[in-house]
Image (spheres, rainbow, N blue to C red):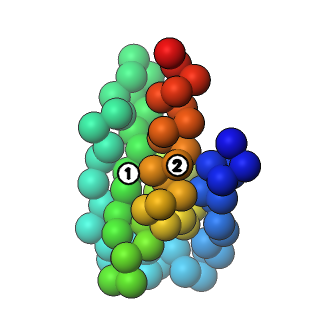
Amino acid sequence: MKDSLALIQHVLSPSRETRMQELHWQKSSFSGGPQGACLHVAITPDGTLRLRESDTPDTVLGTDPAALDGLLHHVRVQER
């Protein structure tokens, strides 16, 4: 679990949000519950990931693929 907490490396400041709008955001295949809340994912030119929710698009989280993979693995194991 400790490695999974590395997922959230930083929350990007509002001044960087404008550049985040230029990324190609994709809706996660895990999105679309009854409330319509969606998780959007984008990859930056340097290969890091950006995540945001449709409800709060100004809050953008940054992570790397390995940290996200660790978190998802942990969640899947806990569901069993």
Foreground residue among 16 and 42: 42
Under circle 1, the secondary element is strand
Identify the mark nearer the N-term, 2 or 1. Answer: 1
User: Are there few (<14), some (14-19), or many (20+) residues within 10 Å of tag 2?
Assistant: some
| Residue 41 falls left or right of residue 52 | left
Q: Residue at x 54, y 58 (%)?
A: 67
Three-letter code, disc 1: His
The residue identified by callout 1 is: 40
Task: Examine the rendering and report whether any part of residue 50 can be seen.
Answer: no
Label 2 vs label 1: CA separation?
19 Å
Residue 7 spot, x, y in % from top left:
60, 56
Three-letter code, disc 2: Gly
Q: Is residue 21 above or below residue 33?
A: below
Q: How many marks?
A: 2
Foreground residue among 18 and 73: 73
Under circle 2, the secondary element is helix
Task: Examine the rendering and report whether any part of residue 78 can be seen.
Answer: yes
Q: Residue at x 30, y 47 (%)?
A: 27
| Residue 77 falls left or right of residue 9 | left
Residue 4 spot, x, y in % from top left:
62, 49
The residue identified by callout 2 is: 70
Foreground residue among 36 and 45: 45
Residue 53 spot, x, y in % from top left:
48, 47
